[in-house]
Image (tube, rainbow, N blue to C red):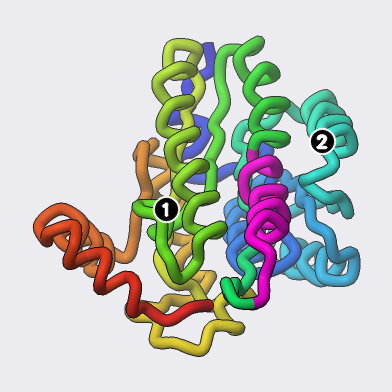
């Protein structure tokens, strides 16, 4: 059986990485950093023009093989066909289920059902659609790694972002469960929970975002932690510590009052 630690440590020459949501933000930064390591790249996104720009960035960063695919992760059939096709050409060593969205919500005017439906469609179903195709392929050959991008917002349901936080809670729990299920088959499953990252998604926020970091810095942290097979990759640590202390040491009633006053997206 292939040694996954050897797959991921050092150079990634002759290794294959597939990333969804790669046309901007964290996904684009991850594509560039894996390109610099020499990995083959399959990149998916909804914006063809931005995918073209990322393709050029990755080639300049050192990747010899880069292919892009304009595909919506909510289209389960198209996504599945693409992932299977990629794996048939080059066995996938690492799949990063990164595609995600965040929408503002105002209870006075927004429809709650519609708000949840469009958020869960990408953040949850999109992850399921990628993972449920990749896992059987990896299981059949006895190795592979899957990273699910959640968020520090996934540690608790937040009134400031009800659909987004709930979707990330779901992704976090799903990844943690799969890690135990598929470990005996030589597959690593990792959950990534970043804090605020400078991306088009956070550009829309009009409230303070403590410990904000660039997408490139976040991508470097994620790559390094994935190489060590960390089950939960949560950062930055000051914010992780604040969240842990707040949710575990403060009375729940006080936490609820604090969260109720937090700014809405």
Instruction: Give the residue at x 47% y 21%.
Output: 3
- Residue 136 covered by magenta stretch: no
Considering depth in this image, is 52 or 210 the residue closer to the camera? 210
Specify the quadrant of the image occupied by residue 108.
bottom right
Instruction: Give the residue at x 76% y 51%.
Output: 43
Considering depth in this image, is 90 or 175 the residue closer to the camera? 175
The kind of secondary structure element at disc 2 is helix
**Label 1 crowd (10 A; few <14 / some 14-19 / many >=20):** many
The kind of secondary structure element at disc 1 is helix
- Image location (x, y in percent) of residue 64: 77, 52
* Residue 59: mark in rendering: none
**Chain part drawn in magenta:** 109-127
Prevailing SS of the magenta stretch: helix
* Residue 76: mark in rendering: 2
Q: Is residue 263 above or below residue 12?
A: below
Instruction: Give the residue at x 68% y 31%.
Output: 92
- Image location (x, y in percent) of residue 22: 71, 58
- Image location (x, y in percent) of residue 246: 18, 63
| Residue underneath mark 1 | 154
């Amino acid at each position: 059986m292939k040694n996954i630690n050897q797959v991921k440590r050092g150079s990634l020459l002759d290794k294959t990485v597939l990333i969804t949501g790669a046309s901007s933000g964290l996904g684009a930064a991850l594509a560039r950093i894996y390109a610099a390591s020499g990995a083959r790249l399959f990149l998916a996104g909804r914006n063809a023009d931005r995918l073209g720009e990322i393709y050029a960035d990755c080639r300049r960063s050192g990747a010899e093989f880069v292919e892009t695919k304009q595909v919506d992760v909510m289209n389960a059939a198209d996504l599945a066909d693409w992932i299977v096709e990629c794996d048939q050409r080059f066995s996938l060593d690492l799949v990063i289920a990164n595609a995600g969205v965040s929408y503002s919500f105002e209870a006075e005017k927004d429809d709650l059902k519609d708000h949840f439906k469009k958020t869960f469609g990408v953040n949850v179903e999109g992850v399921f659609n990628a993972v449920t195709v990749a896992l059987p392929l990896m299981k059949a050959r006895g190795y592979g790694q899957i990273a699910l991008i959640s968020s520090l917002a996934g540690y608790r349901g937040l009134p400031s972002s009800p659909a987004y936080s709930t979707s990330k809670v779901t992704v976090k729990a799903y990844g943690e469960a799969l890690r135990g299920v598929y470990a005996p088959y030589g597959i690593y499953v990792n959950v990534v929970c970043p804090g605020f990252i400078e991306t088009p998604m956070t550009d829309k926020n009009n409230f303070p975002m403590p410990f904000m970091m660039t997408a490139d810095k976040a991508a470097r942290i994620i790559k390094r932690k994935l190489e060590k097979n960390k089950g939960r990759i949560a950062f930055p640590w000051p914010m992780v510590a604040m969240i842990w202390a707040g949710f575990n040491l403060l009375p729940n009633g006080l936490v609820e009052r604090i969260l109720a006053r937090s700014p809405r997206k």
